[in-house]
Image: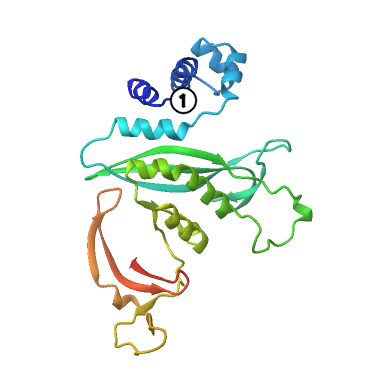
C-alpha cells in the first residue's frame, strides 16, 4: 500500500476523500472473498454501498496512477516496453453495454460477450521479466443489429481504430516512463495501426503473415534522373536471414533468431525482419 500512497501523493488532482477511498478500494480488491460487487466490498472495507457507488461514478485516471506506481518502484537498469491485446469475456443478456459478438481466441470463433482492450507495460531487467496492467477499455459494440449489418466500408470505424484511440490516450504517460517500443501480435500488423503508433511516438514490433511479401533492398547504382529504386525484384528467402542473435525463451532454453534488412511493399518501409 505504501507504493500506492506515494503514487497518489504525486498526483495533484486526487483530493483527500478520493485518496482515502482509492486506498480502501485497492485493499478491498486484494482481500475480498467472492465477487467484487459494491455490496460485497462494503462488508470488507467499511464503506457504505451507496458511497462506493457515488465514488465509482466519478472518473479516475487509473492509467496515471499505475504509471506513477511503476515510477516509484523503478530500479537501475529497468527497460520498459508496451503491449496491447484484447481479452474476451462471455456474457449473456441484451442490455449490457458493449455486448456484441467478439472474437474468442480460446474457442477459435466469434461469440457473444464483452471484449476488453488492455494495455500493459513489460519491465525487462536482465533475465527478469514483469508485466504491469496500465489501462483497460471496453471495446465498442456495433450499434446496428446483427441481421441488418452489411459489409463495412473503408471509412467505417473498426476495432483497429478503437485500439489506436486507446493507445493514443495512454501514450503520453508511457513515453514519460521511457517506453519506445510497442509489441503486438499479428492482428495489429496493419498500416493504419503501425502508422498511427509511429505518429504517437512508439515503434511497433509485431508479426507478419506467413505469406507477407518482403523484397531485397536495392543497393546498386541509381539513375541520374527520375525516381530512385528502393528494392530489387527478387523476394527475400530463408537464405537471406543471416544475422544471428541467441536469446532465451520463457523456460530459459536458448533459441536462435536470424534476421535481415528487407523492404515491405505493404508498409512502404525498410526494416529488420526476424525468423
What is the residue that sits farthest to the right in this orientation?
148
View extreme (front): residue = 225
Residue that badge 1 annotates:
13
Left or right: 274 in relation to 163 = left
Residue nearest the observer in this picture, 102 or 272: 272
Q: Is any atom of residue 128 visible in this view? A: yes
| Residue 216 percent location from the top left of the image | 35, 79
The residue lying at 60 percent from left, 24 percent from top is 57
Please tell me which residue is depicted at 46% across the width and 42% down the height of the picture.
170
SS at circle 1: loop
Q: Residue at x 72, y 47 (%)?
A: 143
User: Residue drawn at (32%, 34%), measured in percent from left and top?
Assistant: 71
The reply, left or right, for residue 180 in relation to residue 194 is: left
Q: Nearer the viewer, residue 125 or 162?
A: 162
Q: Quadrant of the C terminus?
A: bottom left
Splitting the image into 4 quarters, where does residue 220 fall? bottom left
Q: Quadrant of residue 120?
A: top left
Within 10 Å of disc 1 (Cα), the crowding (few <14, some 14-19, many 20+) is: few
Say which quarter of the image contains residue 72: top left
Across the whole image, how many numbered discs are drawn on residues?
1
In the image, is residue 162 above or below residue 257? Answer: above
- Is 258 left or right of 157, judged from the image as shown? left
List x then y, in percent, for residue 225.
38, 89
Which of these two is toward me, 109 or 16?
Answer: 16
Amino acid at each position: 500500500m505504501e507504493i500506492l500512497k506515494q503514487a497518489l501523493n504525486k498526483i495533484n488532482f486526487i483530493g483527500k476523500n478520493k485518496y482515502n477511498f482509492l486506498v480502501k478500494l485497492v485493499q478491498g480488491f486484494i482481500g475480498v472473498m467472492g465477487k467484487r460487487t459494491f455490496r460485497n466490498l462494503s462488508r470488507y472495507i467499511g464503506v457504505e454501498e451507496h458511497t462506493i457507488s457515488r465514488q465509482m461514478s466519478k472518473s479516475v485516471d487509473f492509467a496515471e496512477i499505475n504509471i506513477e506506481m511503476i515510477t516509484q518502484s523503478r530500479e537501475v537498469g529497468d527497460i520498459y516496453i508496451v503491449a496491447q491485446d484484447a481479452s474476451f469475456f462471455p456474457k449473456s443478456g441484451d442490455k449490457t453495454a458493449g455486448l456484441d459478438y467478439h472474437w474468442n481466441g480460446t474457442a477459435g470463433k466469434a461469440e457473444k460477450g464483452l471484449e476488453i482492450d488492455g494495455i500493459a507495460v513489460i519491465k525487462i531487467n536482465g533475465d527478469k521479466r514483469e508485466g504491469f496492467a496500465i489501462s483497460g477499455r471496453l471495446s465498442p459494440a456495433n450499434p446496428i443489429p446483427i441481421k441488418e449489418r452489411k459489409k463495412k466500408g473503408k471509412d467505417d470505424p473498426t476495432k483497429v481504430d478503437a485500439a489506436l484511440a486507446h493507445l493514443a490516450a495512454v501514450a503520453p504517460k508511457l513515453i514519460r516512463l521511457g517506453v519506445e517500443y510497442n509489441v503486438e501480435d499479428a492482428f495489429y500488423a496493419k498500416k493504419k495501426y503501425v502508422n498511427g503508433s509511429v505518429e504517437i511516438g512508439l515503434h511497433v514490433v509485431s508479426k507478419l503473415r506467413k505469406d507477407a511479401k518482403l523484397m531485397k533492398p536495392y543497393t546498386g547504382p541509381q539513375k541520374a534522373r527520375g525516381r530512385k529504386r528502393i528494392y530489387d525484384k527478387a523476394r527475400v528467402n530463408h537464405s537471406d536471414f543471416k544475422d544471428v542473435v541467441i536469446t532465451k525463451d520463457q523456460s530459459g532454453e536458448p533459441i536462435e533468431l536470424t534476421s535481415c534488412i528487407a523492404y515491405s511493399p505493404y508498409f512502404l518501409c525498410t526494416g529488420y525482419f526476424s525468423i
